[in-house]
């Protein structure tokens, strides 16, 4: 038996207890030494660790000298996300490529600049010869985020200028990864679906005429078909997940790793590892699983009293995963509302009608309305709790027939743009390695000779 397939042994368990005993820190010491645990202050607000022009989040405003919560706002390069999305939606255009240009270059493209950028993305939308066979098809994993990381790190070997961190070369690498993330993600899933699940294998080539969102649906589906509404909503999802301030875990990881002077592929793999964590990129999966459990445990999903009872059980750790959370409700920054969720909400019902899932939509709408009331009552939290983007994105992905294994990779496909903008920003503005300080709390220990230890 391989060491990688063995269970934890009693010996490892015993060593774990020793590690825990000698490594656990008294939580009160964070206050004593004024250390911001998790780089957050006592109110949960992030500690300033840098400057950025890429994006901004507004969750509160100063009124009569007091900081008070407000409806959430999100800005890409100083432009309100509502105005950006309204612009391309009103003209019935896909927005991913246009907004990617904005985040990377700091200004909206002209019509000619946008077409040129789209052509650059198309030219980069291919993988090295036999890469799918030699890399993606080998040792397929159920975790497509790991497959994606493996693929990114292997691309280093195919790049003759992999270690060149000059700005033009890094931009070339970033654009290539933005273009190929959809291919590596979907092909990784197809390999898993075939070699592990025993399903048919579909490896479609991307179309040079289609947008990023349209190509994702084309690559994923056996018949390559999708509706205009499906493509439009997936495109919106990608735009809304593209960037979210510089302080989220994976973007901060990008800044930290970039500051060390490492190559683009290593920096992106580090950000992927961060995004893979369930506290960061896996929330929409939890939302979908929670609603599935809700349907299995509520006799009548139209009965709001039953729904409310279930939500109470969630908070009291009596339902679903018994962690005391209503997934998709609330946000680390936003309190009154998440602007991304508000933008999503208008399209969710349209897609539900097209997919014949009106009953599911009504259940989501009921939970969105009832959960804030239940949380306020049961938790005595009155600052404001509302659905976040993950509340709707999981439902949207399920209606688009995306497998759960691709939920986090969809996030990565979008966020690759934001990571790229932040990597370029770090390279342009500083040559200092990011090196925060940690306070040592252990006194000097005396060495004891081996034959004198217990």
Image (cartoon, rainbow, N blue to C red):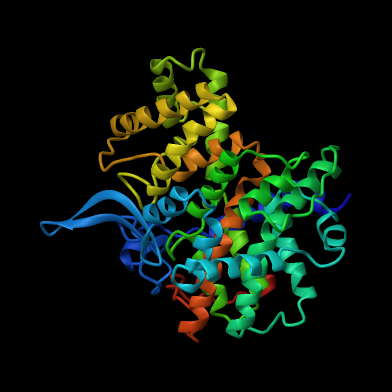
Vertical comparison of 45 with 252: above or below: above
Residue farthest to the left? Answer: 64
Q: Residue at x 57, y 27 (%)?
A: 292
Residue 125 location, x and y as percent? Answer: 71, 63
Residue 376 location, x and y as percent? Answer: 29, 34
In the image, 241 versus 63, the foreground residue is 241
Q: Is residue 300 left or right of residue 207?
A: left
Q: Quadrant of residue 383?
A: top left
Vertical comparison of 285 with 132: above or below: above
Residue 49 location, x and y as percent? Answer: 40, 72
Residue 453 shows in the view: no
Q: Residue at x 78, y 64 (%)?
A: 127
Q: Residue at x 85, y 66 (%)?
A: 129
Residue 303 shows in the view: yes
Residue 266 location, x and y as percent? Answer: 66, 72
In the image, 202 versus 249, the foreground residue is 202
Q: Is residue 285 left or right of residue 10?
A: left
Vertical comparison of 397 with 262: above or below: above
Q: Is residue 309 left or right of residue 123?
A: left
In the image, 129 versus 245, the foreground residue is 129
In the image, 321 versus 171, the foreground residue is 171
- Count of residue discs: 0
Q: Quadrant of the C terminus?
A: bottom right
Q: Residue at x 53, y 33 (%)?
A: 351
Vertical comparison of 171 with 29: above or below: below
């Amino acid at each position: 038996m391989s060491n990688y397939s063995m269970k934890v042994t009693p010996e490892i368990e015993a060593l774990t207890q020793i590690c825990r005993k000698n490594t656990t820190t008294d939580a009160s010491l964070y206050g004593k030494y004024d250390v911001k645990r998790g780089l957050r202050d006592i109110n949960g607000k992030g500690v300033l660790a840098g400057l950025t022009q890429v994006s901004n989040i507004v969750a509160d405003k100063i009124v009569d000298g007091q900081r008070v919560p407000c409806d959430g706002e999100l800005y890409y390069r100083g432009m309100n996300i509502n105005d950006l999305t309204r612009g391309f939606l009103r003209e019935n255009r896909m927005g991913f490529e246009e907004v990617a240009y904005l985040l990377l270059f700091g200004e909206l493209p002209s019509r000619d600049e946008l077409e040129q950028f789209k052509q650059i993305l198309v030219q980069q939308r291919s993988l090295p010869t036999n890469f799918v066979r030699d890399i993606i098809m080998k040792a397929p994993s159920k975790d497509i985020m790991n497959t994606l990381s493996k693929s990114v790190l292997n691309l280093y070997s195919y790049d003759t200028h992999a270690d060149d961190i000059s700005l033009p070369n890094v931009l070339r690498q970033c654009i290539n990864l933005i273009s190929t993330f959809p291919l590596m993600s979907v092909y990784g899933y197809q390999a898993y679906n075939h070699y592990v699940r025993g399903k048919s294998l579909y490896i479609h080539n991307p179309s040079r005429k289609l947008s990023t969102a349209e190509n994702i649906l084309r690559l994923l589906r056996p018949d390559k078909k999708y509706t205009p509404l499906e493509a439009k909503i997936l495109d919106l999802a990608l735009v809304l997940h593209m960037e979210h301030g510089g302080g989220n875990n994976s973007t901060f990881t990008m800044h930290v790793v970039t500051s060390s002077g490492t190559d683009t592929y290593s920096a992106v793999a580090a950000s992927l590892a961060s995004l893979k964590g369930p506290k960061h990129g896996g929330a929409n999966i939890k939302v979908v699983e929670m609603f599935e459990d809700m349907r299995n445990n509520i006799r009548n999903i139209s009965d709001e009293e039953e729904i409310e009872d279930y939500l109470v059980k969630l908070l009291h750790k009596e339902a679903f995963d018994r962690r005391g959370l209503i997934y998709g409700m609330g946000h680390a920054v936003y309190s009154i509302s998440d602007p991304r969720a508000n933008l999503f909400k208008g399209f969710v019902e349209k897609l539900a009608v097209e997919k014949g899932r009106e009953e599911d939509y009504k259940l989501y709408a009921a939970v969105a309305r009832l959960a804030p009331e239940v949380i306020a009552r049961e938790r005595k939290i009155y600052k404001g709790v509302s659905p976040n983007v993950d509340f709707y994105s999981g439902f949207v992905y399920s209606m688009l027939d995306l497998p759960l294994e691709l939920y986090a990779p969809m996030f990565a496909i979008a966020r690759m743009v934001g990571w790229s903008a932040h990597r370029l920003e770090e390279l342009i503005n500083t040559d200092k390695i990011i090196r925060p300080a940690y306070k040592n709390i252990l006194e000097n220990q005396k060495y004891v000779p081996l034959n004198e230890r217990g």
